[in-house]
Image (cartoon, rainbow, N blue to C red):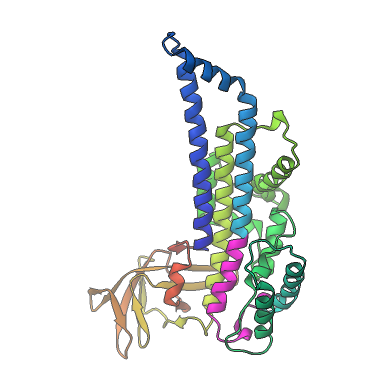
Amino acid sequence: MKKAYLTFQAELNGLLNFLTSVESEGDLLKHILSNDDGASHGLVDYAKAIVGSSTNRRRFVHSQAIIVLYGALERFIEDAIREYVVETRKLCTTFEQLPDAIKSKHSDLSIEYLSRLKEGKVNGVEEGELQSAISRLSSSISENPDFMLNDRAFALRNANASVERIRILLSNIGIPLNLASLLRITSYQAGYVDLYGVEPEQGDYEAIKRNFSKVDALVSMRNQIAHGVVDLDNIEDVGILRERAADLNNFVIAVSDIMEMNFVQYCCLDHVSIPLSKPIAVYNNEIVCIQFNSGHMQNGDVVAIKMNDNDVRFGKIQSIQVDNASVQSVAGQDGITLGFKIGFHAIDREGYRLLPRNVEGILRNSIFQLI
């Protein structure tokens, strides 16, 4: 989910900039203390005072980084789930067209949301949200074509953002978070190898789970900090904190990609997207030639093909040719044959879909396929 990920990335970049300033500050102090010629005695005294409190400074930097990382993860999960619910709703003309999980969970989760609103246990809501939430729930069960959803109800905070808790939240919107499937995300594999120099651990569930141990460790560390318990032996230096940030970024990207894959799979339904005709030919696994009898296609549109129930490939159209001439867009009509170039590995089989144009702005990926 593009918007949620960009918010997460901004939080992460802010932390990384802070860690860079901490490193620069340390280098500056070393420079001052190693060049004590007596001419700047006051400056040296200041530097010695700062260095003298280095343990407290390390504790502060460590605590600040862990709190920011955990907060960014928690916010990403909440934002991404709400974004998924909102954008899925936009693709439906009736409540029944929603994914089964959202349909079945909406009423129960809305009731829980209403209860917590009454108790004042939901932060950041506008005045009158209780009545608005009731109206949205009512519209969803009354066959109102303009029905609304309580998207916030799917992302209520009632437990720490552990991997297991994230799995439960995603299951409420119909997205299975299988850790083995995360390892098949191309960007996760590349990020893991770049960070650790080896490929993620394969094997049974416990072996695979170890790849994501730092996410759950982050929850534990954040809880310790919140309770004022920071063991000096567990304080992490800037380099380790940077590694922790990169590891979390890999995890968030993988979760985001799994959500996008499921969103695109939903977009492959008939009430959402346009089926394209079976390819006449596929060249170099990137150029697909078809008869285009109806609809409208332009560069930048998203094309998808569902490989199976757990796998979908999608990507933006990079170029279009009609009668060997490049065009920016084309309107379908009888007798038109065109070829479009896509970034993912194209195959010669039926099932390509042209997705709604607004989908492009929702997706973080311009190209996606599993390993």
Q: Quadrant of residue 279?
A: bottom left
Which residue is more in the foreground, 318 or 286?
Answer: 318
Magenta stretch: helix, strand or loop mostly = helix
Q: Residue at x 52, y 36 (%)?
A: 19
Which residue is more in the foreground, 144 or 239?
Answer: 144
Which residue is more in the foreground, 62 or 174?
Answer: 62
| Up/down of 232 relative to 253, above or below | above
Which residue is more in the foreground, 121 or 267?
Answer: 121
Q: Residue at x 35, y 84 (%)?
A: 292
Q: Residue at x 35, y 88 (%)?
A: 293
Q: Residue 145 location in percent, x, y? A: 58, 89
Q: Is residue 307 at all visible to an observer of this figure? A: no
Q: Count how many numbered circles sit on residues in the image.
A: 0
Residue 33 highlighted magenta (yes or no) = no
| Up/down of 261 relative to 59, above or below | below
Q: Residue 156 location in percent, x, y? A: 69, 64
Q: Is residue 240 at all visible to an observer of this figure? A: yes
Q: Residue 254 location in percent, x, y? A: 56, 56
* Stretch of the chain drawn in magenta: 78-102
Q: Is residue 306 left or right of residue 221?
A: left
| Up/down of 189 relative to 305, above or below | above
Q: Is residue 253 left or right of residue 38?
A: right
Toward the top, the furthest residue is 38
Q: Residue 174 location in percent, x, y? A: 65, 71
Q: Residue at x 69, y 84 (%)?
A: 138
Residue 83 highlighted magenta (yes or no) = yes
